[in-house]
Amino acid sequence: MEQLKLVRKYLKIKILGDNITFRDHHTERKHVYDIITKTILHGESHSALIIGPRGCGKTTLFNSVLNQVSKEVDLVNDAILVKLNGLIHNDDKIALKSITAQMQLENVVGDRVFGTFAENLSFLLSCLMSGADRRCKSMVFILEEFDMFCHSGRTQTLLYNLFDITHSKQAPMCVLGITNRIDVMEMLEKRVKSRFSHRHIFIFPNEHPAGEEKTPLQTCTEVFVQCLSMPISVASRKVKSPRKRKNRKSVAVEDMDTDVNDKTLEYSIPQEVFTTCNIDSTQFQELDASYIEEWNAHIQSLVENEHVVDALEKFCYYTVNEQIFKDVLFQLVSKLSPKKPFIDVSGITTIVDHTVAGEQRVKMLQSLSILELSLVIAMIHGQDIFDGQPMNFEMVLHRYTKFANTNSSTQTVPRPVILKAFEHLQSLEIIMPVKSDSHGTDTTSTVQKEYKLYTLAVPTEDVKEALKGFKALPTEISHWFNNAIE
């Protein structure tokens, strides 16, 4: 029982807390490492963008590099790390307040009033300068959700001033943007582009160097084994000394320990993770080596099981987001109990099926209002009439109005409200705009929004499934969907 608790706790920390163990992409990692070390050690200024889909390891890559650099230099005295997130620091004042706090200059700023963002930032830099040569500490700015900082509805003052400092070399500064938008450069203002280094670091899942090609299934299997295997080195190894052949015994034990360390080092959690999580790692020394060996053998048997392989293959072709996969593994570990001390094959297939299935689209459809759901049904009927051709708002409105007029119980809704509901369907990507017509001309920029063509982006089967579990669905709506087109 105690052994199982420790294993479960260790694996949960590895799955949720380990954000510095980075795999593959050695060239990209070295690129980021060179940029940061040049800034801290040589006082150079750099800027770059790390681009890749969600869950591919962009933030983990930076954390891994930062962890390595912290072992080589004194980060506390030689550099200042400032982390900003576009979802949180969505205003220049909020961003400045966070920058000031992370620089630990709140007392210096006090109640001072500055005219512009640039003046405030210049004052912060001047406060960091010290010594006879007035040198400033190296600074590393990490901008998570970088695309949110250059949203069209916001001024890009923060980006301009940060890139301007790196461009004019006022102070040694490294600005790293992390985003999943591959078209982020098109969102930048001209003045920001002129000061950006245009250095892009792309992280593509399932991309490997020549000679190390791996299928998505192989990568997924490696992550499965990596996250669920236990390192024997954390356990207290009790090796019984034989009475005879003492000299040969010592060699055998040394060889065995070396072999164990080679095989299990990759399964261990870095000590920095325990420190960050404020967890005492010595408690895991109570684990029994034989129990861990039995556990690891069980994990190896799982990846050789035909049903588990099918489930992993289904998942890895469904998404490349490793965080979603870790959520699946966390559910598996959480279900371990004295009655079920090992992971069940049926449990893996069930959780993967629930994750991969189109259940999310069904839930999203069930979250719609009655009006929005009626517009979806009107579009389905309209596409049946026009043999799958795209429809505009006026065509959908005509189908909905015809249904509403034939059902006296249906509440009359003003046209602007219906148009707003139609636009909400577009924002949810339930309907998607058609960018060009049959002649190849662009229809998104010159046509009024009521006459732009849209196509339904969800399968009819998902709409049917959503209607089955829709709470308080009017009978008329269900009858309208199931009956033939009037």
Image: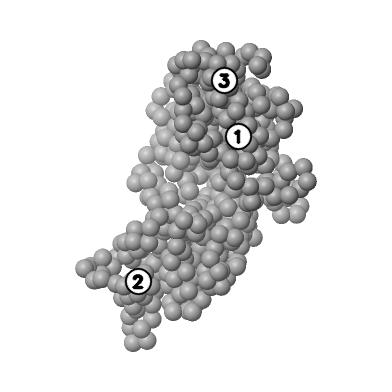
Q: Give the numbered dot on residue 312.
A: none
Q: Position of residue 203 (x, y in %)?
A: 62, 53
First in sequence: mark 2 vs mark 3:
2
Q: Position of residue 450 (x, y in %)?
A: 58, 40
The Cα atoms of the two marked residues, 2 and 3, are separated by 57 Å
Residue 129 showing in the rendered view:
yes
Which residue has dot 3 on it? 403
Which residue has dot 2 on it? 116
Element at label 2: loop
Which residue has dot 1 on it? 394
> With 357 as the anchor, is 366 left or right in this view?
left
First in sequence: mark 1 vs mark 3:
1
Amino acid carrying label 3: it is: Phe
- The crowd level at tag 1 (other Cα within 10 Å; few <14, some 14-19, many 20+) is some
The residue located at (42%, 57%) in the rendering is 84
> Where does the C terminus fall, quadrant-wise?
top right
Residue in the foreground of this view, choosing between 246 and 263: 263
> Where does the N terminus fall, quadrant-wise?
top left
Q: Give the colour scheme shown.
A: one colour
Q: Which label sits in the foreground, 1 or 2?
A: 1
